Structure formats: C-alpha cells, structure tokens
Amino acid sequence: MKKNLFVCGLCLCSFLLIFSEFALAKTYTLRLQCAYPKRFPVGQCTQYFADRVESLTKGNVKIKIFEPGQLAKSTEAFDALRKSMVDMYSGSMLYFSGDVPEVNCEWLPYSWANSMDVIKVYQDYGWLKLLDQATMKHGIHYVAPVSVATMGLMTSFRIRRLEDLKGRKIRAVGMEGMIVDSLGGLPVSLAAPEQYIALKRGLVDGTDFPWYTIARWKFYEVCKYVSAPALHSPGIVEILINNKVFESLPKDYQAAIDRAGWEAFLYSLVSGDALDIEAKKACNQHGVEIIRLDAKEVSRFRDATLPLWEKMEDRTEISGKMVRNLRKFLKASRKKAK
C-alpha cells in the first residue's frame, strides 16, 4: 500500500510540475503587417508561417496578421518595423531598397531558373546569412524569403527581339524599372491595383508581374502575350522581424520562428510551382500566346542586363558577396549541366 501511495505521489508531482510549466509559460503575441491581402498567395503563405510558429511553440507565440495598410502603409512598413511600431513584416523589400540596397540582388534578372536553384542559393551559397547581415544594420532580423512564383513580362504586343521593347511603356517599379530600362523599354511606376485599367486604356503596353495573375487578375483580357524565359523564376519577397522583439523571445522560440520561416519558404515554392502550371493552363484557355525567345535573343537580353549585375556587385560589401556567390552558383550549375 505504501509503495502504491509513493508511486501515486510521484505521478501527481510530475503532473503538477508539467502543468505548472505550461501554466507559467509566458505567451507572446506579435503583430505582423502583411503587404498582401489574405486571399493572395503571399498572404496565404504568411498565414501558414503564423500557424507553424504557433504549433512549434505549443501556442505560446501567436502572430496576429494585419491586412495591407492597417498598421502601416507598404512604403512605410520598414520604418515602422525599425521603430517597433510593428513587430513583423511580410512583403517585398523593394519598397525599402534605399535603406537595404542588397535586396535588389534578389531581383537580378535571369539568375536562378527554378525552385531547387533558389533553395541552393539561399542555403548553400550564403544568401540567407548575408541578407540577415544587411537588415541587421537596421535592427531587423531577416527570417526567410518567400516565393511569388514565376514573374516576367506580360504585354499587349509581341516580343521576339530585344528591339521590340524599345520605347514601350511597361509597368515596373524599383529594380524592375531598372531592368525594363536596360532592355530599352520605358518603365512606368504604378500601384499593383492600377495596372488593369492602365493596360485596358493603353496607358501602358505591358507589365512585369507574376504570371498567375493572367487568370486571377483577368490580365488575359488586356495582355495577349507572355515573354519567356521569365525575368524571375521565381520572384522573391520576405518575412522580417524587429530584432529587439526577436531577441526578447526565449531561444527555442527564436529557433521556432526561423524554422517556421524556412518551412513557409518551401511551402511557397511548392505553391508557386502549382501557380505556374495554373498560369500556363490559363494562357491556353484564354488564347494568350507564350513566346519563347530563341537562344540568340536570350543571350542578347541577358547581355543587356549585365550592367545591373555589375552595379549591384559594386554597391555594398554585402551585395558584392551576394553577386559573386550567385555567379559561383551559376557557373557550378552550367558545369553540372554539361
């Protein structure tokens, strides 16, 4: 009897100890400003990230996602993040390239060719650490990249040669504008929701945007041609967190956020590949022609954008390392292909 009471007592103590650990565990709620609505692929990926963080921390870290503009405008989100007005941000850092010029390296054209390539660049060629170094200068931790699927030119006119772009007005912002300019086009800065009307009215002749929008944004009504290969396969945005907030969390919760970020990245790549298949089906269904440039023209397009690579290599010490590492990756990929 005494032995049974002793065993029962040990079990009760163990239960109370475990219960007290969960009961006393501090909980955290982080405010994340997303640059995209929840129904958008990046918005869905951000929700996946938040759910994984909550699961990995057993509910002790919750991430509350705010719709675009609720806490800060997209163009002001970096400053809000830096000043702790928001805890996290999910969206493109191209808005903040003046503060973090290294982000332009993520948008160098004709770099990685598929999802497996981009994983290698960030994981094996140091981009994840280098981008964290770049944002850390502003007190911000770079959690993970996020795929926006294949992104490139969709136009109302055929592109078969480099000269076909000369003088054409293409909606493109930030680094995308520099790319269009290097190809001979005229970049036009427009907010994403304004593109359809601008294309319909002939105010622009095309856009550089994710191809899945051919169907989802009904761009098939105003863009009858898609130019391949794409400028970005895939395009990349980011998940960021204020570093003071990040460092205030227990180490295992920090690890959970980084792990959830990488898992969200892989999730976005799988989702992006599915979106690319959807885009091709939409093109066939709605009579949108995918024009594939021949090898000679692809080389001409690449050569025209090389000055951008050189400019970014000389921009900062970190961007220089990123470009050189990307060149190493491409060289190794070509050697392996032979």
Image (spheres, helix red, strand yellow):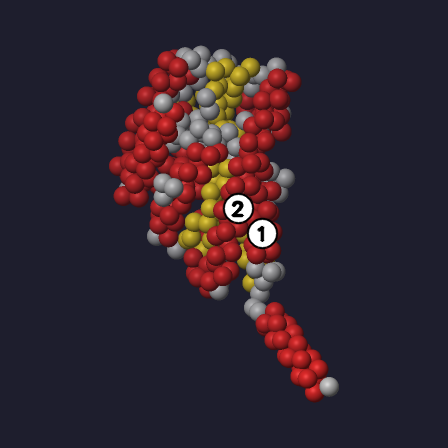
Question: Which labelled disc corresponds to residue 263?
Answer: 2
Which of the image's four quarters has the N terminus? bottom right
Q: Nearer the viewer, residue 276 or 220?
A: 276
**Three-letter code, disc 1:** Arg
Q: Is residue 286 left or right of residue 240?
A: right
Neighbourhood count class around disc 1 (C-alpha, 10 Å): few under 14, some 14–19, many 20 upward:
many
Q: Nearer the viewer, residue 295 or 151?
A: 295
Quarter of image, res 121: top left
| Residue under label 1 | 52
Relative to residue 222, is residue 83 depicted above or below?
Answer: below
Residue 72 visible in image = no
Relative to residue 309, is residue 125 depicted above or below?
Answer: below
- 1 and 2 marks in contact (CB < 8 Å): yes
Q: Is residue 330 left or right of residue 77?
A: left
Q: Residue at x 47, y 37 (%)?
A: 236
- What is the x, y in percent for residue 66? 59, 50
Residue 142 visible in image = yes
The secondary structure type at the circle numbered 2 is helix
The secondary structure type at the circle numbered 1 is helix
**Three-letter code, disc 2:** Glu
- What is the x, y in percent for residue 186? 41, 22
- What is the x, y in percent for residue 180? 40, 24
